[in-house]
Amino acid sequence: MSAQGSPFASLTSDDLVTGEAVALDLPAASLGSRIGSGLIDVVVTLALVVVFILFLGIAVLQTDGALAHVAFIGTLITVFLVIPTTVETLSRGRSLGKLVCGLRTVRDDAGPISFQHAFVRALVGFVEVYAFTGAPAFFSAMLSVKGKRLGDHAAGTYVVRERVRLRLSPPALMPFHLAAWARSADMARLPTSLALAVRQYLGRAQTLDPRTRHDLGSRLAADVATYVSPPPPGGTQPHDFLAAVIASRRERDTARLEREAVMRNRLTGER
């Protein structure tokens, strides 16, 4: 059984992975925070409608009814479609309500939304939020695992909490007796899922019972060994081997980044 099938190797659809294979979980926004941000957006939108209608009413007061009707339709399109779409596109998923509540709209794969996503959300949102007083949006979000309203289902998006406290496990330390081997060993870059599985295992190893810890460590070590040459000294425990590989990769990546920074500063200084 490979690390891909272990309980430590899974990446959910809510996970973003950094370059060091640290999964950053972006939990879906709660129903309460969605309602709070939505109410702020509704109040702002209705206020804009009133302001636009007052100004347009004064502007077309001396004109005919047909022009006033066109101006009214244009106001609704601008306030309910153009402005929300533009704001969410330029802010990469934030409206005023989301900004206040610490929320952001992202794609289902956790990437930033585009104009198309924002437009579909605004278009469906006009129907479910304003035409039907928010009832479809409320029940859809309540029944959805990710709190999606109908506009999110149509656009392929959901809303996440941005203000999440990041908790990282302590970095793996290099076992002293493997330091010399690790310095001379050839270590290829580990696949993201495998590197994540190793980090999770090292962070949780002390909470596992000895048999589970040994079995999981052995399976992960077997997978990691295909990216490392030569193998570690005989009798090396799986936990120590995995810690040595992760620590060595971190040291090498740090050294590489420092070399690149020096080279970049040197080239910039010569210009």
Image (cartoon, rainbow, N blue to C red):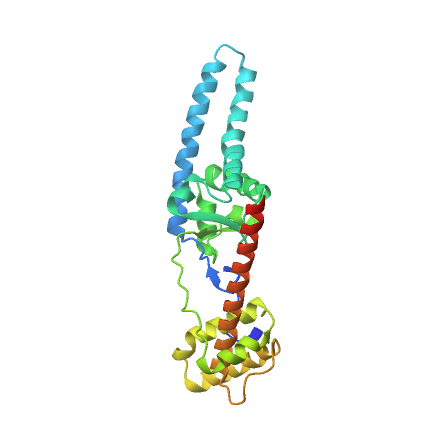
Q: Which sits in the foreground, 255 or 233?
A: 255
Q: Which sits in the foreground, 138 or 218?
A: 218
Residue, far front: 270
Task: Check the picture and name the quadrant holding the N terminus.
Answer: bottom right
Give residue 191's position: percent from left, percent from top. 59, 68
Residue, far bottom: 235
Task: Check the picture and name the quadrant holding the C terminus.
Answer: top right
Give residue 193's position: percent from left, percent from top. 56, 68
Give residue 143's position: percent from left, percent from top. 46, 56
Q: Is residue 136 left or right of residue 33?
A: right
Give residue 178's position: percent from left, percent from top. 49, 81
Q: Which sits in the foreground, 225 or 230?
A: 230
Q: Residue at x 52, y 48 (%)?
A: 152
Q: Residue at x 46, y 43 (%)?
A: 94
Q: Residue at x 47, y 75 (%)?
A: 201
Q: Residue at x 53, y 15 (%)?
A: 65
For residue 142, above or below residue 75: below
